Amino acid sequence: MSGQILIISGPSGSGKSTLLSRLMAEFDNLYFSISSTTREPRAGEKNGVDYNFISTDEFKQGIEQGKFLEWANVHKNYYGTSLEPVEKALKDDKIVIFDIDVQGFHLAMKQYKELITSVFITTKDRLELKKRLIKRGSDDEQTIENRLFNAATEIAHIGEYDYLIINDDLDSSYEKLKAIFISMRSKTQSFIINDVIESWSEC
Ligand code: ADP
Ligand code: 5GP
């Protein structure tokens, strides 16, 4: 077996973290790639758990030192995926989960296309997204407007992803995500195919 990557993208507020925390509570053969970011933590977010919250200087240093597998500037903040822990988790046969934006998805595809299963998660429309962002209560009005603007540009890329989940009803969205996750383990690329063929030729 070898590791694989599950990329989750979608507008901020569409429910990615909510769905992923369910998946992480249920399965242990996965590794959630903790991104680094220069944005302020939201209420309840923990450093080293939700994100590595770092300064802009530290982030720029990381870029120069080639520490990021990919990085992007989203909503005026830097976000990036650290290369080293991802490589280790892949070697340990884990399914590595990235919650990253469309720019990050494009960059990751350049390097890891063969290993990637991608899922786009969204609300059914802009109004529902706005309601959720307001209800979450972590952003001011201007930030919400930025997130809605960004959402519209990201939606245009849905067709590039393997799967789409319209996160209306949380339970049924979770069942869909879980089915995708489980089926990843049966992809032929996750097996050392020659070993299977060899054991068939033995008797
Ligand atoms: P993201 O990680 O994509 O930014 P969150 O997981 O933080 O989004 O979800 C944004 C808000 O929407 C949270 O307050 C969350 O509780 C709520 N939420 C998530 N999924 C649903 C759903 N299916 N129906 C209603 N509210 C939801
Ligand atoms: P938020 O501020 O809501 O946590 O995240 C904002 C956006 O940044 C989301 O679209 C999220 O998927 C994306 N994001 C989070 N971490 C990374 C990362 O490491 N790389 C990239 N490219 N995007 C990220």
Image (tube, grey):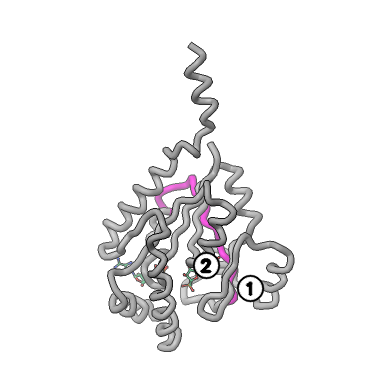
Q: Residue 122: x and y, percent?
A: 35, 67
Q: Which residue was labeled with disc 1?
A: 54
- Dot 1 or dot 2: first in sequence order is 1
Picture coordinates of residue 105, whole percent (x, y): 51, 61
Q: Residue furthest top?
A: 203
Q: Amino acid at mark 2?
A: Gln
Q: Which residue is mark 2?
A: 103
Q: Please, is residue 25 above or below residue 126 in the view?
A: above
Establish if 59 lies above or below 139.
Answer: above
| Residue 108 x/y as whole percent | 55, 58
Which residue is at a point 55% across and 40% down the rendered structure image?
A: 2
Task: Look at the image and say whether residue 31 sits in the magenta stretch.
Answer: yes
The answer to whether the beta carbon of the residue marked 2 is less than 8 Å from any atom of ligand 2 is yes
Considering depth in this image, is 44 or 64 the residue closer to the camera? 64
Badge 2 density bin: few <14, some 14–19, many ≥20, Cα 10 Å = some
Task: Report helix, strand or loop for mark 1.
Answer: loop
**Residue mark closest to the camera, 1 vs 2:** 2
Residue at 40% over, 48% down: 181
Measure the alpha-carbon separation of dots 1 and 2: 21 Å
Front-most of residues 161 and 138: 161
The disc at residue 17 is none
Magenta residues, as a range?
24-38
Regarding mark 2 in the picture, which secondary structure is present there?
A: helix
